[in-house]
């Protein structure tokens, strides 16, 4: 590196340290000697540099010279931290932690190699009146990601790696020695290893090769790698899981409530491999019913801070792609030890309720149990029993269904919202190629299980929230959901009105009631998906937190996740905390658990994004052979560069670019979710039916382009 470059980076670092001194000292006026003393700088040359820095920063209006040689920051909070949100043109906005602070615009040349999602320190320029806040990145505090999926491009002496991520604007330079066997045009995962200050491109190495583009395994693994999910378990984790004994000792049984002689069964999808919940049913002598909700006792097998525990926490969730599950726990646990398989004794953590004829709770009990599942049902099996009123355990299933109905009715009466978003499933051939698309139907069998799981989750949360006295509430992991922001709800109500649906937003209860009417009314209609998606988008996101606030969508004052510890780490935390408190333990450290909650919420979002990416890929693959075909679709989204259309018949979504609609010049009307022609005033609005032709499919980008067929 040249001396000049070296000097400039030293001055950069020193400038930052000098300005930090003013911040740390409450902006007390200081001269260059005082600044040097606080930085422990004693040699004359460095002190001269500090003097020059003070003068330069005064010229830039970062500092002001109060009297000769005495300086002060022009305004405090010149430096802020935040997250980079990159735009398509290479500029960025910095989203700060302070929700009342507006985002700061950063021009591309002021980004200093910061990438999308990175946490950075930004110097904010003094703002001119009426202008947006602008600044420059002065330090990258934490990289959001260093690994990318993409394509290797090889030349004789070096290689470049072209990332799939559209927000990664830089190709990665790969020395030939770091190719790890990758050939030209192959899909791989690259890791950034260095980014010299003056270099345009980062330097990296190929971490592992994924395979040929377009192959199902390659593409699914690329999606997992892109969202940061590992493709296998570390050897140490596998060894630890293999070493766990599958023997249930008499001492362990003696510590538990025994349900082995009570009718118990599981109800799951036909292709499920892990069964983490079972229901037991018994009619009591007093005429009431005892319903046990039995959950795999994962926390019995996973020691806190073991390699297994750390890996489960890091993943935080299982990931469900179109054709595979990437489990949170190794198969020995998820499909073996912890899976509540039929005709096997299993250890559980249970919530047991005595319910009367109207599904009101008379008694509740929580604790460790041992069960024996009599039968493994699929949802289809149970649906058949409900519809035909015949089959295995018919009396138990019909009574459970009746009780579930009453729980559901009461839940909606109390203001819960019923979102029945369509769930897309693919028929795949042996190579994973989609041969058909269908919408998964939710019937009474699904709802029966859901309502008893909701009951367990809600009552566990309520039970712990009552522990501790007054303000000394015990630390716990809750699942919370904020009420929607009024303006988002008002926009949705206005849009729904165009289809003839009325949404009353006077109170939370009225909103919920009218949303439920709407959801019921819209079921099966062509606009169902658009309205459901838009309603969900106007809602806040559910998160994990130690703060005991309510769950708006379910209308529960307290709610948690207790029922799926095989596939969700928060449920493992809930089991540990509940067991600790049931045994008289003191309240756990809230800050520690809040950090774990925040990580779990982030990983849940990544898993949902990965799942969506796999659906988008399969939709693109499905339409690849249908280029030129004409379909009827519904406008499902509008942006300034195009409109998204969802094909009614197969739920595949693609985009019509505005520049391709040639009969007029169209612009976005954001408020009315519409695209409007400037001359002829033709309007295309969210929810409108249009005819489209499949124009182009780009599998790499998971993009489908449509052209509009105009009357």
Image: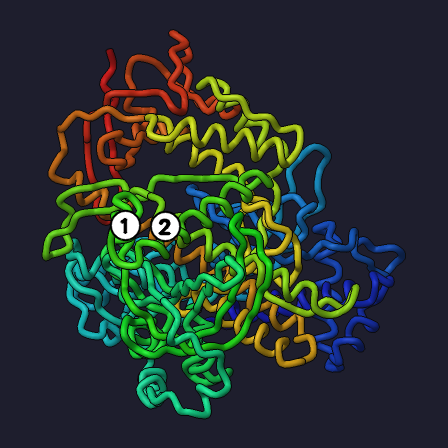
Name which quarter of the figure residue 524 lies in: top left
Say which element carries label 2: helix
Across and down, in percent, residue 667 comes to 43, 21
| Marks 2 & 1, CB-CB < 8 Å contact | yes
Q: Which mark is residue 572?
A: none
**Relative to 150, 83 lies left or right:** right
User: Residue 525 versus residue 534: which sits nearer the camera?
Assistant: 525
| Residue 409 appears in the picture as rendered | yes
Position of residue 68 relative to residue 692, above or below, is below
Q: Which residue is mark 1?
A: 385
Residue at 34 percent of width and 54 percent of height: 395
Residue at the outermost front position: 285
Name which quarter of the figure residue 235 lies in: bottom left
Q: Quadrant of the N terminus?
A: bottom left
Q: CA distance from mark 2 to mark 1?
A: 8 Å
Residue at 53 percent of width and 24 percent of height: 671
Q: Which residue is mark 2?
A: 398
- Mark before the other along the chain sequence, 2 or 1: 1
Residue at 56 percent of width and 62 percent of height: 598
Give the class, few, some or many, for how many residues have Cα within 10 Å of label 2's Cα (few <14, many ≥20): some
User: Residue 614 versus residue 364: which sits nearer the camera?
Assistant: 364
User: Residue 576 versus residue 168: which sits nearer the camera?
Assistant: 576
Q: Quadrant of the C terminus?
A: top left
**Relative to 535, 614 lies left or right:** left
């Amino acid at each position: 590196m040249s001396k000049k470059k070296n000097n400039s980076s030293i001055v950069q670092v020193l400038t930052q340290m000098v300005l930090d001194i003013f911040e740390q000292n409450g902006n007390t006026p200081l001269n260059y000697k005082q600044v040097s003393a606080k930085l422990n700088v004693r040699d004359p040359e460095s002190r001269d540099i500090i003097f020059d820095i003070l003068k330069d920063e005064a010229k830039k209006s970062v500092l002001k010279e109060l009297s000769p040689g005495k300086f002060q920051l022009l305004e405090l909070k010149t430096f802020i931290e935040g997250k980079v949100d990159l735009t398509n043109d290479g500029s960025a906005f910095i989203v700060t932690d302070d929700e009342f602070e507006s985002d700061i615009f950063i021009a591309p040349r002021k980004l200093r190699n910061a990438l999308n999602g990175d946490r950075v320190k930004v110097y904010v320029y003094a703002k001119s009146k009426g202008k947006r806040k602008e600044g420059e990145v002065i330090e990258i505090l934490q990289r959001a990601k260093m690994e990318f999926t993409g394509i290797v491009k090889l030349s004789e002496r070096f290689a470049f790696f072209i990332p799939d991520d559209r927000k990664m604007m830089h190709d990665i330079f790969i020395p030939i020695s770091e190719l790890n066997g990758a050939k030209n045009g192959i899909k791989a995962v690259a890791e950034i290893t260095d980014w010299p200050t003056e270099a345009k491109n980062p330097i990296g190495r190929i971490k592992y090769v994924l395979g040929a583009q377009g192959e199902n395994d390659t593409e699914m693994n690329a999606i997992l790698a892109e969202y940061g999910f590992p493709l296998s378990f570390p050897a140490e984790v596998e060894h630890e899981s293999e070493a766990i004994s599958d023997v249930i000792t008499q001492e362990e049984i003696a510590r538990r409530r025994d349900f082995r002689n009570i009718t118990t069964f599981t109800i799951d999808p036909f292709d499920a491999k892990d069964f983490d919940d079972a229901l037991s049913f018994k009619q009591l002598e007093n005429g009431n019913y005892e319903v046990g909700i039995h959950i795999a006792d994962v926390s019995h097998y996973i020691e806190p801070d073991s390699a297994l525990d750390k890996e489960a926490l890091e993943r935080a969730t299982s990931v469900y792609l179109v054709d595979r599950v990437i489990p949170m726990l190794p198969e020995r646990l998820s499909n073996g030890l912890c899976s509540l398989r039929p005709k096997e004794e299993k250890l559980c953590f249970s919530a047991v309720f005595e319910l009367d004829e109207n599904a009101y709770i008379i008694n509740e009990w929580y604790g460790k149990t041992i069960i024996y599942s009599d039968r493994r049902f699929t949802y289809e099996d149970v649906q058949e029993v409900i519809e035909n009123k015949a089959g295995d355990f018919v009396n138990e299933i019909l009574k459970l269904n009746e009780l579930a109905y009453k729980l559901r009715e009461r839940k909606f009466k109390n203001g819960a919202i019923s979102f029945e978003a369509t769930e897309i499933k693919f028929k795949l051939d042996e190579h994973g190629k989609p041969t058909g698309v269908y919408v998964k139907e939710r019937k009474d069998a699904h709802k029966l299980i859901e309502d008893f799981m909701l009951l367990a989750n809600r009552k566990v949360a309520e039970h712990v929230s009552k522990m501790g006295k007054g303000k000394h509430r015990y630390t716990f992991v809750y699942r919370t959901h904020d009420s929607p922001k009024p303006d988002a709800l008002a926009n949705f109500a206005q849009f729904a009105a165009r289809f003839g649906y009325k949404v009353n937003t006077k109170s939370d209860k009225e909103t919920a009631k009218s949303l439920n009417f709407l959801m019921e009314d819209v079921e099966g209609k062509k606009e169902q998906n658009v309205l459901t998606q838009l309603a969900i988008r106007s809602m806040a996101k559910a998160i994990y937190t130690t703060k005991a606030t309510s769950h708006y969508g379910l209308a529960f004052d307290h709610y948690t996740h207790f029922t799926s510890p095989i596939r969700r780490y928060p449920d493992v935390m809930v089991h540990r905390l509940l067991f600790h408190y049931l045994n008289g333990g003191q309240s756990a450290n809230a800050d520690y658990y809040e950090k774990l909650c925040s990580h779990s919420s982030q990983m849940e979002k990544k898993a949902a994004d990965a799942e969506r990416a796999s659906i988008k890929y399969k939709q693109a693959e499905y339409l690849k052979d249908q280029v030129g075909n004409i379909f009827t679709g519904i406008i499902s989204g509008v942006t300034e560069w195009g409109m998204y259309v969802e094909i009614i018949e197969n739920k595949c979504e693609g985009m019509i670019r505005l520049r391709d609609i040639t009969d007029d010049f169209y612009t976005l009307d954001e408020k009315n979710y519409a695209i409007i022609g400037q001359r002829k005033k033709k309007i295309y609005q969210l929810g409108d039916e249009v005819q489209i032709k499949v124009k182009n499919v780009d599998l790499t980008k998971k993009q489908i382009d449509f052209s509009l067929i105009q009357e």
